[in-house]
Image (cartoon, grey):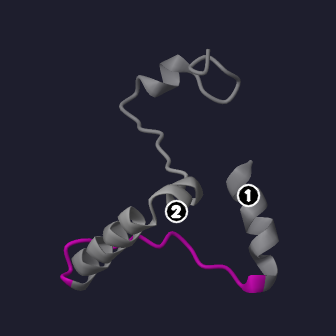
Amino acid sequence: MWWNTKSVSATDLMQNRVVAGLHLGLLMERQPDRIQAAMKHLFQLYEEGKIKPKIDSTWPLDKVHFHLHVLYT
């Protein structure tokens, strides 16, 4: 089962952690209005100072390949 694979262990998931994701490409194809409304709401929250995105790091464009490799390993 998915909860006992090499990359995800059931015991690791029991440590009050969340692994979540959303495939926006498929949702954009099927419900573009929903994405547009959500993005509008997110920008409104940002402009009101209610959410503050955390920027972990920035990379020079010529180093992106290396850093993407680091992210995925």
Image coordinates of residue 15 in percent, x first then y, are: 40, 27
Q: Residues within 10 Å of mark 1 (few under 14, many from 20)?
A: few
The image quarter in which residue 29 lies: bottom right
**Residue 41 counted in the magenta span:** no
Instruction: Give amino acid for label 2.
Output: Met
Image coordinates of residue 58 in percent, x first then y, are: 60, 79
Q: Residue 70, labelled with which disc?
A: 1
Q: Residues within 10 Å of mark 2 (few under 14, many from 20)?
A: few
Instruction: Give amino acid for label 1.
Output: Val
Along the line of sight, the residue nearer the viewer: 33 or 39: 33
Q: Residue 34, labelled with which disc?
A: none
Label 2, on which residue? 28
**Residue 56 counted in the magenta span:** yes
Q: Residue at x 56, y 20 (%)?
A: 3
The residues colored magenta run 48-61
Question: Is the N terminus in the top left, top right, bottom left or bottom right quadrant?
Answer: top right
Mark 2, secondary structure of its residue = helix
The image quarter in which residue 18 lies: top left
> In the rendered view, would you say 12 is above or below 33?
above
Asked if the residue at tag 1 contacts the one at tag 2, i.e. Cβ–Cβ closer than 8 Å, the answer is no
Mark 1, secondary structure of its residue = helix
**Prevalent SS, magenta region:** loop
Image coordinates of residue 47 in percent, x first then y, are: 25, 85
